Image: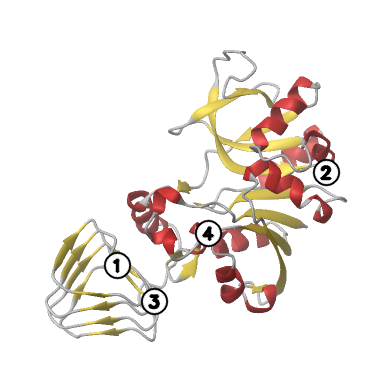
Amino acid sequence: MRAFVLGAGLGKRLRPLTDVLPKPLIPIWQRPLITHAFEHLCRLGVGEFVINTHHLPHTYLETFPGSVYQNAAGLSCPLHFCHEPVLLETGGGLENVREYFQDEPFVVYNGDILTDLPLEMALEAHSRDASLVTLVLRSGGAVRNVAFEAGSGKVVDLRNALGTNHANQVQFTGLYIVSPAFFDFLIPGKIESVVEGFLRALQAGRRIGGIVIDEGNWWDLGDPASYLEAHAAYAKYHPVVARHGTAQIAPNADVDAQTCVSAHCRVAEDTHLRNTLLWPGARIGRGARLENCVVRAGDEVFGQHFGKIL
């Protein structure tokens, strides 16, 4: 099975972190965010990935030499990078890669989320209900704008664009299962949200299914604060590597368990680090005190800092 992972977004709310890396490549416990998506999908049976790119596209090729991802099971998964010189948005981006998805249902996965939802449930629902698309939903959340009929398992409106004023509104997770016939509702060359395609399918009387999955965890890494929160929360549910083997940490440095010290970092004497992320090669000077900070790759920091991107 193949999956389409969205990697072309600009990540504006995460700036200045995304000035140097696309959002899907920012590190989560020593690994690029997108590799957490890859592993999640590999456990579902996906063995090949299509990724669209736009912002800093060369960094994907640097991160994945040979366009291959070696998964946790030791299998080599081919990666197909599709560059968008002009950002096509979610609908245009999906239509642009239709050549890879002609034969069987596939998964679409937003590359800027971190989650461990049991997606097997969505695959089963998609197959059982013969839906054109099956959206993975959450009953709670900050943005509940998908009108969902729990009894029938149907999505009937999105963003109230069809004026249904439906009482049951749920949150879309950015994850969905797609049958190739959905491409008939995307317009070649048009820059638009995939929601427009969903709405055209609904207006044509086609079934857009949904499944509410409240099990597991789902984090949207929208801004630096949510990035730090998701990073810390993830470690409560999954094994992580907090100290890279190449990192140098002074014996008397006070570094808490929520702090991630990446490859080739140096942490000097008398430092205090709390819930802080050190990207590869970061250097923390003697006596520094950092709380709720992110130190970007190769930067050197002295003094006291709280809640900053450094």
Q: CA distance from mark 4 to mark 1?
A: 20 Å
Q: CA distance from mark 4 to mark 3?
A: 16 Å
Residue to which mark 4 is pinned: 24
Q: CA distance from mark 3 to mark 2?
A: 40 Å
Q: In the figure, is residue 154 to the left or right of 280?
A: right
Q: Residue furthest front?
A: 86
Earlier along the polypeptide chain: callout 4 or callout 3? Answer: 4
The residue mark sitting in front, 2 or 1, is: 2
Asked if disc 3 and disc 1 are in contact, CB closer than 8 Å, the reply is no
**Please, is residue 148 above or below residue 176 in the view?**
above
- Identify which residue, 20 or 165, lies in the foreground: 20
Amino acid at pointer 1: Thr
For mark 3, give the secondary structure.
loop
Residue 204: quarter of image: top right
Identify the disc placed on residue 280: 3
Residue to which mark 2 is pinned: 180
